[in-house]
Amino acid sequence: MVVVFGGLVDRRFLNDVTVYDSENKLWFTPECTGIGSDGQVGPSPRAFHVVAAIDCHMFVFGGRFGNKRLGDFWMLDTDIWQWSELTSYGDLPSPRDFAAASAIGNRKIVMYGGWDGKKWLSDVYILDTISLEWTELSISGSLPSPRCGHSAIMVEKRLLVFGGRGGGGPIMGDLWALKGLIEEENETPGWTQLKLPGQPPSPRCGHSITSGGHILLVFGGHGTSGWLSRYDIYHNDCIVLDRLSVQWKRLTTINEPPPARAYHSMTCIGSRYLLFGGFDGKSTYGDMWWLVQEDDPIAKRLSAPSSLSESKPVPSSNDSPPLEPKGSQKEENPIAELQKRLQILVSPVPKLGFIDESVDAELIDLSSRLLGEKASSNDPSECIQALRDHWGKSTANSIKLKELAPLLRDYQRLVIRQHIETMASESPSTLASSLTKQIYRFYHVKNASQLRVDDIPKLLSEYKQLLSG
């Protein structure tokens, strides 16, 4: 699951949570709970905040709303989709945007730099996510110049910081490593500027840096053509920092890359990289691209006449094994067979617990009882269709408690079916926009016990829309 929070579209700041299920290739919007100090659910709208994920928890700090820099601190529990506004202690960071942060192991987060509305920052803060205590790291020796819009990522025991903008000078292209972040190592905190061989990225900010296997992948961002230029140049190149050879390498792709952009997100999923969103100086993107190895099953699917241009295949220098199941695995249920014919490479049994209607004993039993004596003369598929017709005419108050679990499972089943049909019927040019608009509030719910009373009318309404679709 890739969780997207907030952002900026056409001068409108967002605070929505949208999730991409990379296994089933669809978006859904979870119904989040958790009231903050302002009485609203979740954080206020914002962009250019920092996010770090530890286990199932997503931590959010700062950002900007309009011209106001924010300094509040939130955590989203993605197991139950609940927000908590956290009261932290210690050396509290000042409100800021365009900072960068990374998780340290499974307990701490490190944050560096940013812009507080008046000056560029070069401070380093460490958060203990258990005690919720912030500590400002005291660092002696040479320091990177203050900056914002840079990238920061933990690699082994070091924080690597690349690029950014600050100090009134040109956009930067320097690479720094910070030691002393791991208590057990007893190292004195200190910065070291790294000058590595190879072809480094041009100076930039608003880029992404993503760790996958033995490489760090830098993509996109924007820079200028020099001191005298007022105009930003947006990039769509891929540069790899190979941790084995310790040098920069240009990643040559076999086809056209995505349009140039900055302030996007890049997520590593197995041996693939998922690019989402961004800004090119004029407009905001909502498209998705996969960066994959040339022999990846996605590339094979896209080369077939009936396949979908969800992304373009490109080679990657990541040596991780492919994610897809081997062809020897049997897929016997109807949806799996349809997926196979459409060359949509999805596991037939997602982690959410989806099961085919033909083996959903509770659904079949409920539909048989609805038909009563007529059930013996009808096959199970007709019984299930009769139950769906019954739910299609029902009101929320008439839904019985014992019906909720099979209704929820059938809702999720119909979501997947409609999504597959959409992918089969849409043209490649309209597919991306149509899929992004399809969001499902209850697709993520693992069992009916997680539903609240006021969820039932919403669930039934979406279910009826799926039936009519």
Image: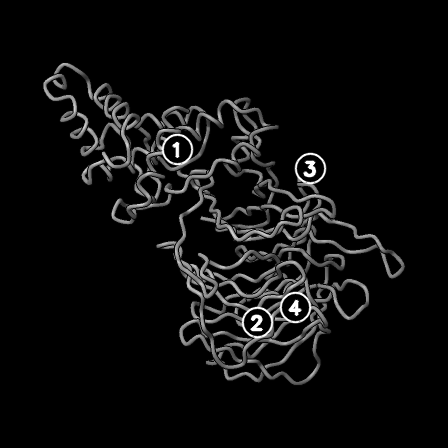
The residue tagged 1 is 416
In front: 209, or 232?
Answer: 232
The percent coordinates of residue 105 (x first, y second) are 46, 68
Which quadrant of the rendered structure holds the C terminus?
top left
The residue tagged 2 is 158
User: Which color scheme does this rendered protein use?
Assistant: one colour
Amino acid residing under circle 4: Gly
The percent coordinates of residue 464 (x first, y second) are 35, 29
Name which residue lies at 55% across and 66% down: 154
What's the distance in space between the residues labelled 3 and 4, CA to CA? Answer: 33 Å
Name which residue lies at 73% across and 66% down: 174
For the residues labelled 1 and 3, say whether their Cβ atoms are less than 8 Å apart.
no
Amino acid residing under circle 3: Glu
What's the distance in space between the residues labelled 2 and 4, CA to CA? Answer: 19 Å
Amino acid residing under circle 2: Arg
Mark 4: few/some/many CA within 10 Å (<14, 14-19, 20+): many
- 113 above or below 322? below
Can residue 56 be seen here?
Answer: no
Among the 4 quarters of the image, the one containing residue 153: bottom right
The percent coordinates of residue 430 (x first, y second) are 59, 28
What's the distance in space between the residues labelled 2 and 3, CA to CA? Answer: 34 Å
The residue tagged 3 is 256
Label whose residue precedes the other's in the sequence (1 or 4): 4
Label whose residue precedes the other's in the sequence (1 or 2): 2
In front: 459, or 204?
Answer: 459
What's the distance in space between the residues labelled 1 and 3, CA to CA? Answer: 30 Å
- 440 above or below 239? above
